[in-house]
Image (cartoon, coloured by chain):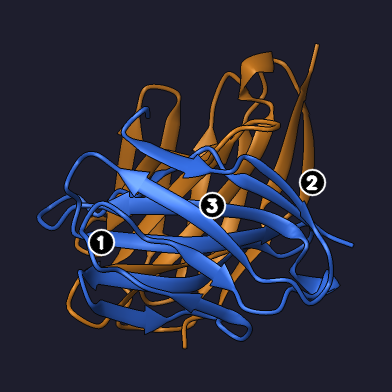
Chain colours: A blue, B orange
Amino acid sequence: DAGITQSPRYKITETGRQVTLMCHQTWSHSYMFWYRQDLGHGLRLIYYSAAADITDKGEVPDGYVVSRSKTENFPLTLESATRSQTSVYFCASSTPGDSYEQYFGPGTRLTVT
Amino acid sequence: GENVEQHPSTLSVQEGDSAVIKCTYSDSASNYFPWYKQELGKRPQLIIDIRSNVGEKKDQRIAVTLNKTAKHFSLHITETQPEDSAVYFCAANSPGVGGGNKLTFGTGTQLKVEL
């Protein structure tokens, strides 16, 4: 579990501000994911990345931007935060091969006021 | 895209009883179905998964069954214990750009095991 970390763990920001959530993994996993978790909706995929410079939209990508210049990092940016983006954000990673298991980070609780 | 429905949303059982959570999926191309457990304030963790070439898989007190024809799969927990109390999520895969698997999750089941 210590192999995937997220920062910050808690963040309060104002509507309209840009916010970047960081995700770092030490396993050299190829695949990385960003989810948001809201009551009643479970976990919803925001963006996915198969490798450096390869990203793909998930179910709820609007208002979010991702980049992946290095395998170990996968930052998520909210370009102009809205109250509807108040949520818990989880990063996850997985490795190619027979196991499809995704390993989740500890989460970031974001509040937009 | 894939759509996963999960029932029930809450489930309360007595300690020692069995619990069953059911999910349906829409994409017949899905071939991987994991179940995650999330304790309060913690991250989701994989507890069991099944591939489409298998009808049932067991790991001690937990088992998962898959019916490809009907597009549904279920989690069975026997001899429930208080530490089984958590939120359980099912998921189904779909291919992602560049390989790998994107997961679509159900909305979760809050399981409460009462003494």
Could you confirm whether marks 3 and 1 are on the same chain?
yes
Left or right relative to A96: residue A22: right
Left or right relative to B93: residue B109: right
Q: Residue at x 18, y 79 (%)?
A: B98
Q: Chain of mark 1?
A: A
Q: Residue at x 20, y 51 (%)?
A: A29
| Label 2 residue SS | strand
Disc 3, disc 1: CB below 8 Å? no
Q: Residue furthest front?
A: A17
Residue at numbered disc 2: B10
Left or right relative to A61: residue B97: left
Badge 1 amino acid? Tyr
Quadrant (top left/top right/bottom left/bottom right) for the N terminus of chain A: top left
Sort mark 3 into few (<14), some (14-19) or many (20+) by Cα contacts within 10 Å.
many
Q: Chain of mark 2?
A: B
Residue A63: give x, y in percent of width and height: 63, 83
Q: Quadrant of residue A27?
A: top left
Residue A20: give x, y in percent of width and height: 56, 62
Residue B48's place in the image compared with A80, above or below, is above
Mark whose residue sits in front, 1 or 2: 1
Residue at numbered disc 3: A90
Q: Would residue A25 be seen by someone viewing this image from the given angle? A: yes
Q: Quadrant of residue A82?
A: bottom right
